[in-house]
Amino acid sequence: MGQSLTSLFIVIQVLKRLGIAFLTLIVVSFAVFFATDMLPGDVAQILLGQAATPEAVAGLREAMGLNEPALQRFFGWLTGLTHGDLGTSYANNMAVAELIDGRLKNSLKLAGVTTAVSVPLSLTLGIAAAMWRNSPFDRAVSIATISVISVPEFMVATLSVLIFAVWLDWLPALSFGADVSSFVDVLRAYAMPVITLSCVICAQMIRMTRAAVIETINTPYVEMALLKGASRWRMVLVHALPNALGPIANAIALSLSYLVGGVIIVETIFNYPGVAKLMVDAVATRDLPLIQSTAMIFCISYLSLITLADVIATLSNPRLR
């Protein structure tokens, strides 16, 4: 009976967090639509140029439905969004989904490579720092993580260009994400963006992993294992780490959510052909459907990771288990 009530409580908590995420997404979609709709300038005038006649501008506004009330356009856009219809780009006269398709794949590749590099590195450094707490290694890692956290993404990207592209001439200053056929090509295409993004998320992940492992090490059953003669490695990997997986997974999900904000800066600086670069270009041309769709992609990604972190925190709660 108690186990059934616990399972029911967990399901309710998970559904509650999913419901909060859904409501947040509705509010965010409202904010995205009206924030982009209030951008200065007339879309029809920008598309036709300054030499366009007032009649031509009025006709284009009518054709694009810009004369309709804002709420009516919002609900029409939201309805299309729920059915997978992202609209048509004003500047390219193409389906927004078609424009985003290739760029989204590039952004996912960049996020995947960054995750493959940053997660193992962060877990290794975080666990090692927890094992040798208060040692010179732990202090060095702590100083490095605090220093990296204090530096914004654009500064890390700029320093990476200066060091690796200008001074050392090892890597290209721009990353075009071209097709790669060898490991060297992968390094040249992704090294600079991955270095910048990894610096952003590794520092947070290392500190949170270290804190989670230290908290588990201080529990009585781990101390008992040490008193029985278990080595330090066995104490951490066998006894402490399995019980710290919940907080560590939560830390990974929270840290990866910073990719959503960092990738906008990184893709712009390195001219990487991803969704963030597409959104920045769309802002310059006032391409509202494209801006709104790309912004919603970032919002959905961020909310998904945050919700995943909340669910993991709920499921890993020892009191519920």
Image (cartoon, grey):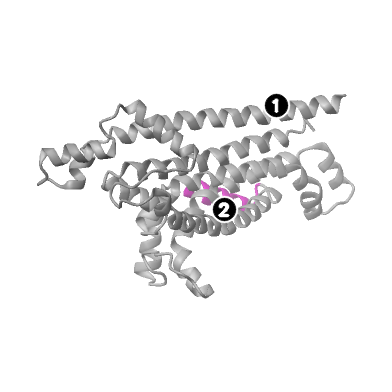
| Residue 80 occupies quadrant | top left
Disc number placed over residue 140 in the picture, else none: 2
Q: Could you say where residue 123 lies in the image, as x and y percent from the top left?
A: 64, 52
Which one is earlier in the sequence, the residue at label 1 or at label 2?
1
Camera-side residue of 296 and 197: 296
Range drawn in magenta: 134-149
Residue type, label 1 = Ile
Q: Is residue 309 visible?
A: yes
Which type of secondary structure does the marked residue at label 1 adopt?
helix
Disc 2: CA contacts within 10 A as few (<14), some (14-19) or many (>=20): few
Which type of secondary structure does the marked residue at label 2 adopt?
helix
Residue 175 magenta-drawn? Answer: no
Please name the residue shown 67% across and 53% down the image. Answer: 128
Please name the residue shown 88% across and 24% down the image. Answer: 1
Inter-mark Cα distance, 1 to 2: 43 Å
Disc number placed over residue 12 in the picture, else none: 1
Please name the residue shown 57% across and 28% down the image. Answer: 20
Residue 50 as seen in the image, left or right of residue 139: left
Disc 1: CA contacts within 10 A as few (<14), some (14-19) or many (>=20): few
Instruction: Verify CB contact (< 8 Å) between mark 1 and mark 2.
Output: no
Which of pointers 1 and 2 indicates the residue nearer the eye?
1
